[in-house]
Image (tube, rainbow, N blue to C red):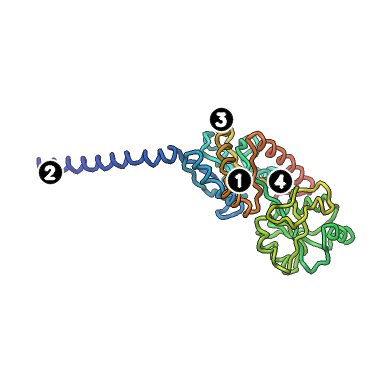
Amino acid sequence: MQALSHIKHIFFATVIAGLSIAVCSCPSWAQSAGNTIGRIIVPFAPGGAREMPARAVYQEMAQLLGEHWIIESHQGAGGAIGTVFVAKAEPDGKTLLMAASSHFVTAALGTKPHFDPVKDFVPVGNIGTQSYVLLINAKLPFKSVADFVSYAKKHPGEMNYNSAGIGSSTHLAMAYFCRQAGIELLHIPYKGTQEAANDVLAGRSQAVIIPTAGIGVYMADPRIKALAITSRRRASQYPQIPTIDESGLKDFYFESWFGFLAPSGTPKATVQRLNTALNQAISQDVVRQRLITQGIEPSHDNADEFEKVFLADKVLMTRLVQDVGLKAE
């Protein structure tokens, strides 16, 4: 029995010693990661347009913070599940929402997303803005936006346009364009941007507005023509495409921002720290190039500047949804 007791003593001593080594080894990893694990929540499926800008900046941002950050996808309910998750998270700067202008659309459509798009969040930083390109089937005789609008006014309801779905940014952008131009086109919603654009290629539809991030594959395709871009200025990646404003529809622009939001109640000092790290990351050439390749014009807004963009966009998106008569389905 004494021998058995001695063996047990050696066994437990060995286990305890092993655990001690493991525990002692953890701080070295945690210290290198700043003793912090942060999460960026993407409220849509992995690999989508919402996740790409987050991946473009998060590693450099984490290094500047001296922390370890990961990206998690919490998809479902049109983005509401992931958004609610962040709204209810601890306001400690360790959980951020990868948001975009569509953050306001669900609320504007009159649905019940179980979160307030403004009151439940604090704007942290603007990664950049994305614009959209008006594409038409190349067989159409239009050489400019003015030609397109002139024909549509003379033939109301004769032409149609595609979108990535009801309430999508591609739908809102084109509906807004039609509203401002005073034309009537038939809307055909699809399940995604690629499907919508492909039917314009095939000639089954006349027009579509898609994000700059997705137009690269179409620029060299002779079956499609890029008429104009929705940004305030010509895109650095596609300087040959005129803006809609300079094409005759004055003061028209439609852009989407991509940025980080934190739960309401996050201390201002924490927000400032995150914003500084984000802007320093964006200033790095490698990060800027990633964003530009994605069709995103990098931003350097401080937290207060981003808050102004955030609140102004809330007003715009709400008014736009009402103006074009969109309703939740």
Between the residue at mark 3 and the residue at mark 4, the CA separation in whole angstroms equals 34 Å
Residue underneath mark 2: 4
Between the residue at mark 4 and the residue at mark 1, the CA separation in whole angstroms equals 13 Å
Residue underneath mark 1: 80
Secondary element at image label 2:
helix
Q: Nearer the viewer, mark 2 or mark 3?
A: 3
Residue underneath mark 4: 109
Tell me residue 151's x, y (percent): 87, 61
Q: Disc 4, disc 1: CB below 8 Å? A: no
Residue at the spot x=65%, y=33% of the render? Answer: 304
Relative to the observer, which residue lies in front, 235 or 193? 235
Amino acid at circle 4? Leu
Amino acid at circle 2? Leu
Q: Residues within 10 Å of mark 1 (few under 14, many from 20)?
A: many
Q: Is residue 71 found left or right of 212 in the rendered image?
A: left
Q: Residues within 10 Å of mark 2 (few under 14, many from 20)?
A: few
Secondary element at image label 4:
loop
Secondary element at image label 3:
helix
Mark closest to the chain's N terminus, 2 or 3: 2
Q: Is residue 102 found left or right of 141 in the rendered image?
A: left
Tell me residue 189's x, y (percent): 71, 58
Residue underneath mark 3: 269
Between the residue at mark 2 and the residue at mark 3, the CA separation in whole angstroms equals 59 Å
Mark closest to the chain's N terminus, 2 or 1: 2
Mark closest to the chain's N terminus, 3 or 4: 4
Residue at the spot x=65%, y=39% of the render? Answer: 301
Amino acid at circle 1? Ala
Quadrant of residue 28 within the rendered picture:
top left
Mark closest to the chain's N terminus, 3 or 1: 1
